Image: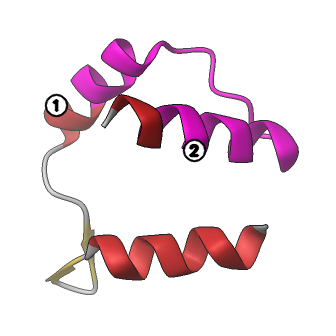
C-alpha cells in the first residue's frame, strides 16, 4: 500500500497537486473517509489504475 501511496504522490506532483502527507498519514485519512464510491458502486482497483494510466 505504501508504494501505491508514494506513486499517487508522484502523479500528484506531476499534475500540480502535491501531497504533503506521509503514506501513514494519508492512509489514516483514507480510513476516516471510509469506502470510496462512485455513483453508488465501489471503485475497483483495476478501474482506478486505468484512470492513473490515463494521466501518464
Residue occupying the point 23% across, 21% down = 28
Q: Position of residue 20 (x, y in %)?
A: 62, 15
Where is mark 1, residue-wise?
A: 32
Residue occupying the point 21% across, 40% down = 33
Residue occupying the point 27% across, 75% down = 43
Q: Is residue 29 above or below residue 25?
A: below
Marks 2,1: beta carbons within 8 A? no
Q: Position of residue 19 (x, y in %)?
A: 63, 26
Quarter of the rendering containing residue 31? top left
Mark 1, Cα crowd under 10 Å, few <14 / some 14-19 / many 20+, is few
Secondary structure type for disc 1: helix
Q: Which residues are magenta?
A: 5-29
Residue occupying the point 85% across, 45% down = 14
On the rendered image, what quadrant is the N terminus found in? top left
Q: Main secondary structure of the magenta part?
A: helix
Q: Is residue 41 above or below residue 55?
A: below
Q: Nearer the viewer, mark 2 or mark 1?
A: 2
Amino acid at each position: 500500500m505504501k508504494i501505491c501511496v508514494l506513486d499517487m504522490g508522484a502523479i500528484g506532483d506531476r499534475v500540480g497537486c502535491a501531497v504533503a502527507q506521509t503514506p501513514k498519514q494519508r492512509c489514516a485519512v483514507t480510513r476516516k473517509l471510509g469506502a470510496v464510491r462512485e455513483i453508488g458502486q465501489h471503485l475497483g482497483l483495476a478501474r482506478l489504475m486505468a484512470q492513473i494510466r490515463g494521466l501518464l
